[in-house]
Image: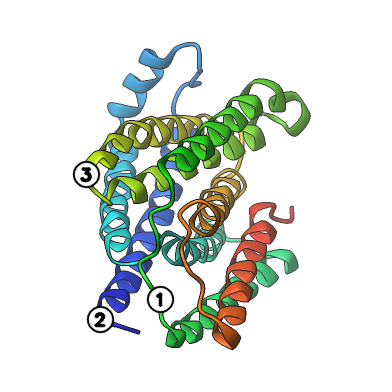
Amino acid sequence: MNASTAIALVLALASTVLINLAYLREHDAAAALPVLAIRRPLQSARALLTDRGWLLGFAMETAGFLLYVAALRLASLALVQSLAAGGIGVLAYVSARVSGRRLGGRERNGVLLSSLGLVALAVSLVGGSAEGGAGSTRAVIVWLAVTAAAGVLVVTLGRRMMGVAVAEGVAGGLFFSLGDVSTKVATQGGARLAFVIPLILGYTLGTWLLQLGYQRGGALTVAGLATLLTNAVPIAAGTIVLEEPVPSGAYGALRILAFAAVTIGAILLARPEK
């Protein structure tokens, strides 16, 4: 593992902790506010932006995002996102401590599996970790368009089938993933700086949907589902669309198992036991 990858790992871990702690603070602040509504965006935005607790959480999330961008400059999207996926364990642990309850069996298994995945990922880094390929611009645009369409469908049609809080968490995660992929592409510079536009749109819509979900569901359910998709979708995009290489041989197999472990662990944690 080279120096740039090591620095990227430290930045990614710090980003993950900050962002997941920010989710909890934002949840508590949003849940205490008057009802936020999609049809009243200006009124709802004013309520959020005038609440000190929510602004502090958003400032923490912004700081975590800046660390995330720095990590993406140094390492592949799939690698950084796999570390971020382990952050749901931080969310589960702190959420349980704050609420004064013990983690259920499924949640403990999720934390354990995510942790094992991160250990496997660290071992796989011995096999090297290239920054990754660029992929074709057309393929990236198609991926972003499909992700956005899926997010819109979940918001418009999934609320009745999945429940409002779950639908908003899923849709928020999809839009966040759109922003994550756009961030990685934008850091490549040149004409790809134009991807700052979907970056802003993705993060804005993702943040908005999470705040709505926070008023209707628990932090671990809403933010957990969002975190799952925020990490699983970009991990897939890094390999499929951006053509980021995976080490060959045993290290490559271990890397794939690590990606799978943190993703499955996130799935377990995203739907906590009552």
Q: CA distance from mark 3 to mark 1?
A: 24 Å
Amino acid carrying mark 1 in the image = Ser
> Residue 200 or 217: which is nearer the viewer?
200
Task: Please state which of the two labelled residues, at mark 3 or mark 1, is closer to the viewer.
Answer: 3
> Residue 55 or 167: which is nearer the viewer?
167
Coloring scheme used: rainbow
Task: Please state which of the two labelled residues, at mark 2 or mark 3, is closer to the viewer.
Answer: 3
Q: Which numbered disc, 1 or 2, marks the residue that appears first in the sequence?
A: 2
Marks 3 and 1 in Cβ contact (< 8 Å): no
Instruction: Give left or right: position of 92 versus 129.
Output: right
Q: Position of residue 274 (x, y in %)?
A: 74, 52
* Location of residue 42 with respect to 245 vertically, above or below: above
Query: How many numbered badges does the structure rendering display?
Result: 3
Q: CA distance from mark 2 to mark 3?
A: 25 Å
> Residue 135 or 258: which is nearer the viewer?
135
Residue highlighted by disc 1: 129
Residue at the location (38% across, 33% down)?
198
Q: Which numbered disc, 2 or 3, marks the residue that appears first in the sequence?
A: 2
Please tell me whether mark 3 sits on a helix, a strand or a loop.
helix
Amino acid carrying mark 2 in the image = Ala
Instruction: Give left or right: position of 27 versus 258.
Output: left
Q: Position of residue 148 (x, y in %)?
A: 53, 31
Q: Position of residue 137 (x, y in %)?
A: 41, 41
Q: Which numbered disc covers residue 190?
A: 3
* Location of residue 117 with respect to 250 vertically, above or below: above
Amino acid carrying mark 3 in the image = Gly
Residue highlighted by disc 2: 3
Q: Residue furthest top?
A: 39
